[in-house]
Image: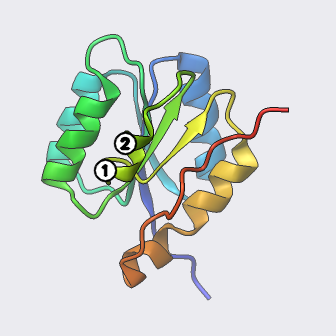
């Protein structure tokens, strides 16, 4: 059985992390488009279709939540995963602006599990019920 085709936009300004995420997602079978700035992300969102956006919260040129709002306006069915080293307000998740968030450092297995569910979220209309936070030891 063929795997569903899933396009993921990776928005991360840290070059090594961006490269690592793009490599991992490609190995897992996802179509990946990596960008480093919010400006590049907005251009991609307005000109291409994505199933998911993996979005850094803190970018040098545009706030990650502003990009998430643009994604919701242009591609309302895209799944948005926010990646952050900061504490998020739970209202951000509960408002439906983002579907889930991951704390840095990223747990790649947890990210992989979430990304594998994207095709079923699209067909069922379901969204992530709870934020996907990394548990601190």
Q: Which residue is mark 2?
A: 91
118 over 55 or under it: above or below:
below
What residue do we see at 26% from left, 19% from top?
62
Q: Nearer the viewer, residue 42 or 83?
A: 83
Above or below — where is 93 with respect to 105?
Answer: below
Query: Badge 2, how many Cα within 10 Å: few under 14, some, many 20+?
Result: few
Q: Do callouts 2 and 1 mark residues in contact (Cβ within 8 Å)?
A: yes
Residue sitting at 50 percent across and 64 percent down? 129
Residue located farthest toward the top when viewing the structure as drawn:
60
Task: Determine which of the numbered discs, if any, sits on residue 45 in the image.
Answer: none
Q: Quadrant of residue 24?
A: top right
What crowding class fits label 1: few (fewer than 14 Cα within 10 Å), some (14-19), or many (20 or more)?
A: few
Task: Identify the residue position indicated by label 1 in the image.
Answer: 95
The residue located at (31%, 50%) in the rendering is 95
Visual colour scheme? rainbow
> How far across and how far down the image is residue 109, in percent?
74, 50
| Quadrant of the snapshot with the C terminus | top right
Q: Is residue 51 above or below residue 38?
A: below
In 3D space, how far apart are the residues under numbered discs 2 and 1 (Cα atoms)?
6 Å
Q: Residue 132: x and y, percent?
A: 60, 50
Quarter of the image where the N terminus is located:
bottom right
Q: Is residue 119 left or right of residue 98?
A: right
Left or right of residue 74: residue 64: right
Q: Is residue 9 visible?
A: no
Q: Position of residue 12 (x, y in %)?
A: 46, 26
């Amino acid at each position: 059985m063929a795997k569903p085709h899933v396009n993921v936009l990776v928005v991360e300004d840290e070059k090594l992390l961006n490269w690592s995420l793009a490599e991992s997602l490609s190995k897992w079978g996802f179509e990946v488009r990596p960008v480093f700035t919010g400006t590049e992300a907005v251009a991609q969102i307005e000109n291409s279709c994505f199933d998911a956006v993996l979005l850094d919260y803190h970018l040098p040129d545009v706030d990650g939540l502003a990009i998430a709002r643009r994604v919701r306006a242009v591609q309302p069915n895209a799944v948005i995963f926010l990646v952050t080293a900061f504490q998020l307000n739970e209202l951000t998740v509960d408002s439906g602006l983002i579907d889930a968030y991951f704390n840095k450092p990223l747990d790649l297995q947890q990210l992989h599990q979430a990304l594998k569910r994207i095709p079923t979220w699209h067909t069922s209309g379901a969204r992530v019920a709870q934020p996907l936070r990394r548990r601190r030891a």
